[in-house]
Amino acid sequence: MLDSPHGQLRVAVVGTGLIGGSILLRLHEAGLDVAGWDPDGSTRASGRERGVPFPDDLGEAVRDRDLLFLCGPLPSLPDTLLTVAKHAGDGCVITDVGSTKGAVAAFAVAHGLTDRFVPGHPMAGTERSGITAAVPALFEGAAWVLCPAPEGIRPFRMLSGLVVDVFAARVVPMSPEVHDSVVALSSHIPHLLAGSLAGAVAGSEVSDAVLGLAAGSFRDGTRVAGTPARRTADMLFDNRGQVMRQLGQVRAFLDGLASALRGQDSDALVALFQRARDLRTALLDRDLLAHRREFPAGGDHRAEMAYLLELGAAGGYLTGCRPDAERVGYTGHRPTTADAA
């Protein structure tokens, strides 16, 4: 997985904040030939202090590389994708780490880049930002979404092996549309809820007293409110349609809680919270079964694509991808509550 036609895999990371910096440092720690680039000169200098090549010129950073990670802000991704695609060779695989996938995937289709661009989203992070917050082990055990396309199945296989072998993450194959629908509920709306709670307290006449009594539930419930505000706003705007649609479900449930409380309906309130508790328990105690699937390395990839997309949509993931000249083998894990594959 770590070889290229030129010998060892050559990688560049464009944009080295928390996520990009963590990717860069892990690749460097693993001994790969990796270079970084960031539009901020002080960030480039900080990277060089860590022993990583950081050219001042973007073209120099990405030229002759086998793999590029695009890790800049969401609004910059389309232009950056076009720029690096021009500087990198035709055989260079490109992926991103943005928290929404629909817009950048459609952009890649429109510009004929789906044979080399694999949309990606590592589901890891903290409320901190910048390369000084980067942690090489950030992705260990985390879900890392990759969006395969039939014409880009070989780059998907290469990236899957790298994500598992180098970052110790779990690959979740998904279509861009399913990804954006899922993260609206799993990631984006939690930012709205955390911001709402923290913002309400900030405007309260008892805010200082709240901070004095705040324990684990308040800290956990508002953790992501510490994310840089511009980053949160970019994420929400980029997935606005899905967020607004899924927010309706959250409002309806919250209205149910409020109605039961207002009407002093203890049974209804308990039933709603039990439903929520069951979901939380399922999150912490999911039972998955491992399996092995193989597909032809060449030819028609429809069966392979169907397997991958169904696995991710069912809540499963990959912990292995081993292609050779004839076959590609996947090690998958599927929830026992899902229908058999």
Image: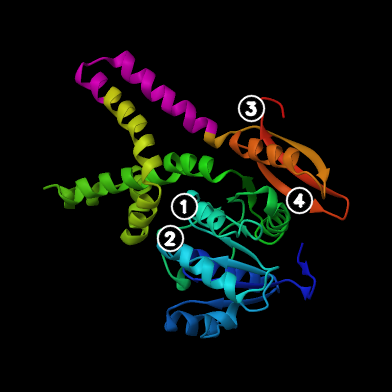
- The label shown at residue 338 is 3
Labelled pair 3, 1 in contact (Cβ < 8 Å): no
- The label shown at residue 188 is none
Instruction: Find the distance from the CA under tag 4 to the CA under tag 1.
Output: 27 Å
- Quadrant including the N terminus: bottom right
* On screen, residue 92 above or below 291: below
Tell me the amino acid under the disc marked 2: Leu
Instruction: Find the distance from the CA under tag 2 to the CA under tag 4.
Output: 29 Å
Residue 303 in magenta stretch: no
Instruction: Estimate how packed mark 1 is, as few (under 14), some (14 to 19) or many (20 or more) residues with alpha carbons within 10 Å.
Output: some
**Circle 2 sits on which residue?**
74
**Tag 4 secondary structure:** strand
- Residue 151 shows up from this direction: yes
Q: Main secondary structure of the magenta part?
A: helix
Tell me the amino acid under the disc marked 4: Cys
* On screen, residue 97 above or below 267: below
Q: Position of residue 291 (x, y in %)?
A: 77, 37
Instruction: Find the distance from the CA under tag 2 to the CA under tag 3.
Output: 33 Å
* On screen, residue 141 above or below 12: above
Q: Earlier in the sequence, mark 2 or mark 3?
A: 2
Nearest-to-viewer mark from 3 and 1:
1
**Circle 4 sits on which residue?**
321
Q: Residue at x 40, y 46 (%)?
A: 188
Labelled pair 2, 4 in contact (Cβ < 8 Å): no
Boundaries of the magenta span: 258-282
Instruction: Find the distance from the CA under tag 3 to the CA under tag 4.
Output: 22 Å
Labelled pair 2, 3 in contact (Cβ < 8 Å): no
**Tag 1 secondary structure:** helix
Q: Position of residue 267 (x, y in %)?
A: 33, 13
Q: Earlier in the sequence, mark 3 or mark 1?
A: 1
